[in-house]
Image (cartoon, rainbow, N blue to C red):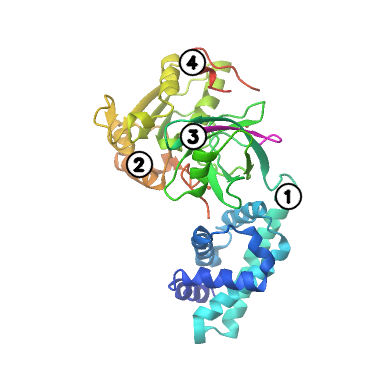
Amino acid sequence: MDPQALKDSWANTARHGDEVPLFFYSHLFLTHPETRSMFPMSMAGQRDKLVAALGRIVSDVDRLDEVLPFVQQLGRDHRRFAVLAEHYPAVGESLLATLAHFSGPQWTESLAGQWAEAYGLVAQVMIEAAAESAKHTPPWWNAEIVGIERRGLDVAVLQARTDHPYPYQPGQSAAVEFSRRPRLWRYLTPANAPRADDTLELHVKIVDGGQVSTALVQSAALGDTLRIGAPVGAALLLPEDGTDLLMVAGATGLAPLRALLEQIDRQWQADRTQRRVDLFHGARTEADLYEHQLLGELAAARPWFRYVPVVSHDASFSGQRGLVGDVAAGTGGWSDRRCLVCGSPNMVRHTVSALTSAGVPAEQVRYDEFTAGAEPTPEPAVAAPAGIAGGRWGQ
């Protein structure tokens, strides 16, 4: 197999832009119509995902061992779409037909054979990862919405109870499908540590053009159902070495960090584990600081925690103003901290840049691709700690 030939072939095909996924899916649905039901009615978002996934795999085809975790995760993730081993040949057939169509005279028997071999390797890894996953976990968990709080016009806090225990760690995310928007999945992150009653707290903010987030915030009702994919991500897990933390969150990017705060607080209550935590939460206006009271009360009740709200577009706000990444970085003194960042992709990029420019070693800054704003193509009931009003903490 000639990796460079595959890369050149893919680059030549990818330059045709949206025509590539349009041809691919047209071929797939015409030749294998049974696959159409696996996809949403609107394919607009799906097209970019196909190109991104194929591009990443092909660009590293000569280093398959390095992208193995990505390919394996792709195989596990496809279980929630009811993809079976017998579907892979159909996809491979349409992939080769697409490449042949856009390659023209450059498409040779030799190149076709190399592509078939490369796809076969990737498909086998995905099939084996899916089969191994099926031995231990279902393709998804069913959950019922049992509580709804709407915090303003564009944020909702949902309580959902899974039909059986959901094995996640605080800081992990999951793809979620809402019954009112079938076959559309959005990555969300539980905002709580695991509970004995199998409920998850989900913080949802409307994303521009986001069909799932808009429906959840505006239309979700008690009794509506969700499907929740397997937990993913390790970047935001709590470090086991007890290192102090800087947390920087934008909007509902607060969710995974709030789950970590609950985990840390449980440890502190159990054995008074000392771990210093500073949280900067950024929003456009003071009204958008949707957990302001709870976090303020936690800071007042816990010696290990400091909470700094930051507002970017509200001149009347009396606290810190500006972009949350700039405010956090400008405070300084974080070079010995593990820095956890979560928010929109733009917020994460800006904050990571600000922190590293301020002298924080890059290896100390962690963030996850499964952000609270991502619409993908990404755990015993505890009494509220003393001083935390409202009884929502840990419930």
Q: Earlier in the sequence, mark 1 or mark 2?
A: 1
The secondary element bearing badge 4 is classed as helix
Badge 2: how crowded within 10 Å, few (<14), some, or many (20+)? many
Badge 4: how crowded within 10 Å, few (<14), some, or many (20+)? few
Instruction: Please give the residue where the numbered disc 4 appears in the rendered image.
Output: 389
On screen, residue 279 versus residue 174, left or right, reads left
Residue 332 vertical placement versus 274 (above, below): below
The secondary element bearing badge 2 is classed as helix
Distance from the alpha carbon under mark 4 to that under mark 1 = 42 Å
x then y, percent, for residue 42 = 54, 59
On screen, residue 260 versus residue 163, left or right, reads left
Q: Are marks 1 and 3 in contact (CB under 8 Å)?
A: no
Give the extent of the magenta segment. Answer: 157-167
The secondary element bearing badge 3 is classed as strand
Q: Amino acid at mark 1?
A: Ala
Instruction: Please give the residue where the numbered disc 1 appears in the rendered image.
Output: 134
Q: Residue at x 48, y 20 (%)?
A: 274
Q: Are marks 4 and 1 in contact (CB under 8 Å)?
A: no
Q: Amino acid at mark 2?
A: Thr
The secondary element bearing badge 1 is classed as helix
Q: Earlier in the sequence, mark 4 or mark 1?
A: 1
Badge 3: how crowded within 10 Å, few (<14), some, or many (20+)? many
Q: How many marks?
A: 4
Q: Earlier in the sequence, mark 3 or mark 4?
A: 3
The residue lying furthest to the right in this view is: 135
Q: Residue at x 35, y 41 (%)?
A: 351
Nearer the observer, disc 4 or disc 2?
4
Nearer the observer, disc 2 or disc 3?
3
Instruction: Please give the residue where the numbered disc 3 appears in the rendered image.
Output: 156
Q: Earlier in the sequence, mark 2 or mark 3?
A: 3
**Marking on residue 351:** 2
Q: Amino acid at mark 4?
A: Ala
